[in-house]
Image (cartoon, rainbow, N blue to C red):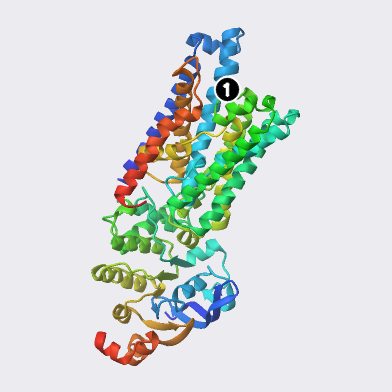
Amino acid sequence: MINTAVSCRDLSAGYGKKAVIKNISLDVRGGEILTLIGPNGAGKSTLLKAIAGYLERLDGSVKIGQMENADARELAKLLSVTLTDRVRPELMTCREVIELGRYPYSGMFGRLSDSDIAAVESAIDDTKTREISDCFFSKVSDGQRQLVMLAKAVCQQPQVLILDEPTSYLDIKHKIDFFEVLRPLVRQRQTAVIISMHELELARTVSDMIVCIKDGSVADTGTPDEIFDPDKIMRLYDIPKELYDKYIG
Amino acid sequence: MKNKKNAKYPLLFLLLALSVIAVFWANLFIGSVNISPRRILSALGGADGTQADIIRKIRLPRAAAALFLGGALSVSGYLLQTFFNNPIAGPFVLGVSSGAKLTVAAMLIIFSGYSISSSSGFMILAAFAGSMLALGFVLIISRKTNNMSMLVVCGIMIGYICSAATDFLVTFADDSDIADLHDWSQGTFSGTNTHNVLTAAVIIFIGMIGTLLISKPMHAYMLGSDNARSLGVNIKLLKAEIVILSGLFSACVTAFAGPVSFVGIAVPHISRTIFRTSKPIVMIPACFLCGSIFCMLCDMAARTAFSPTELSISTVTSVFGAPIVIAVMIRRRKEGSL
């Protein structure tokens, strides 16, 4: 199944009139995980927001599924975005959070149809969150909260998932758990994933494609094996060779 | 589990509705003149006489005012708490009530010679302008800080500035203009007549329908604006709707009863404790009913506790409301979420 779910062409965007990211082109196919790596402030989050349409596009185009300019409700059925805001809504159960993923489909007062409930149940199963589904979202661990947010995103039944540093605050066990859930899920549902992360070791094992972002532009694109070359990493992050050898090599 | 949880909502609503009726009845029944239940019923049925007048012209509008305005004030507080994601937000602490008080006082003094000043629609309009002005300042400040406590402190300061400006106006106004103003600026449900209550009830009814219509996007908004946006919520529209509705509710209250403190903060927490949920579709009517009960009880206490001397409504609501706010803050501090 070779269908391109996201296609960016010469995308430039930023805050106000100033372009933070310039001339970015990338493609992601359904069932594929594309990972953005690069130094802090390079523009990874900005790029994710630009693809999501949260920022004014200064130039270029983004195609999500077959749509180029969908309205908000239609877009919400194609694309789910989870950024880094760390909200802890009170007295809201995990199931309630997951059910909100049906927002674009549900009725006027948020009433769920049978197919909505079926989508919620399968999202809960696929993300292994059944045990905590009746707990309050504010009371579960950070790792569980990320899985619940993933379940919410999956509930939208999007063709494209955008995840901004979903594992940054988690310990190694929970990072691994997260990708153990994410990988089979996107393969099975043929969802295209664009994810940003700082954990290079993980990026190497979980990604199908890597895009290196530096100074708001694409510095390099390739499969994990092509990108994870010490010279390229040293250049991307501006790490002198002796320090790289001392700490990483 | 889920079904069990939802099943208790109708029961709780039924209990609240029965309590509203019971407390409303008690408000008609209790007062300095003893009137038998049978007389109350015949007065409501349209009988004549002094006692019937007391019921129809004094107790009934006053109890109805406490019912509608108390409910509106609580919903206003709930909307503001949701908007700012801040558990100690409310129309009084954010200076919204004081802003409304300032414009209403100014209008009363400026137009004191004209009959326009007694028009309830005009009063609401003036109060709405004041609420929006104060909320506008709070919104500007909220762009600069995400800190919950800072926001509240700034709101209280805006409230003080508006109160000072009101005092300034009152100081230089003619005594005859401000006789009513003094009682009103302390907060009371006693100044209402049937016509005012009906006006307020109509506006509040429309406002409640509007609030229920945005309950779905509000639920999504509780996950934060970025997440809500990803679900297809039009954030700018939703924010404008919340601000306008909460301003409308608190304007209504301030226009007819003056600034009433702590109801807007405390009652949403009482409702959350009862229902153990944050779902707006449940919380909006729950806040309204709890606010009605709370205000009717407080007004009854204000009338009867030191009868024949009457307390201002804010005196009573503060006594019961402030400890609830303190309890909420301590509990949240323990959980490390404030």
Q: Residue furthest front?
A: B172
Residue drawn where x is 47% and y is 48% of the image? B153
The answer to whether any part of residue B249 appears in the image is no
- Total numbered circles: 1
Residue lying at the far right in this picture: please name it: B114
Graded by Cα atoms within 10 Å as few (under 14), some (14 to 19) or many (20 or more), the crowding at tag 1 reads: many
Q: In which quarter of the image is residue B88?
A: top left
Q: Report the side of B174 relative to B3 (left or right).
A: right
Residue B208: give x, y in percent of width and height: 55, 39
Q: Is residue B279 left or right of residue B207?
A: left
Q: Residue at point 50% right, 70% down?
A: A52
Q: In which quarter of the image is residue B211?
A: top right
> Please, is residue A70 above or below residue A44 in the view?
above
Is residue A186 visible in the rendered image? The answer is yes
Q: Position of residue B75 (x, y in %)?
A: 50, 40
Residue B70 in percent (x, y) is at: 51, 32
Which kind of residue does numbered mark 1 sit on? Pro
- Nearest the viewer among B167 and A116 is B167
Numbered disc 1: secondary structure: helix
Task: Give percent across and percent down for residue B301.
Answer: 45, 22
Q: Tell whether A194 sits left or right of A203.
A: right
The chain holding disc 1 is B
* Residue at image point 47% right, 35% down: B263
Question: Furthest-top residue in view?
Answer: B49
| Rendering quarter of residue B202 | top right
Would you place residue B331 above or below residue A84 in this image? above
A231 versus B250 height, above or below: below
Assign the N terminus of chain B to one quadrant of the image.
Answer: top left
Q: Mark 1 points at which residue?
A: B61
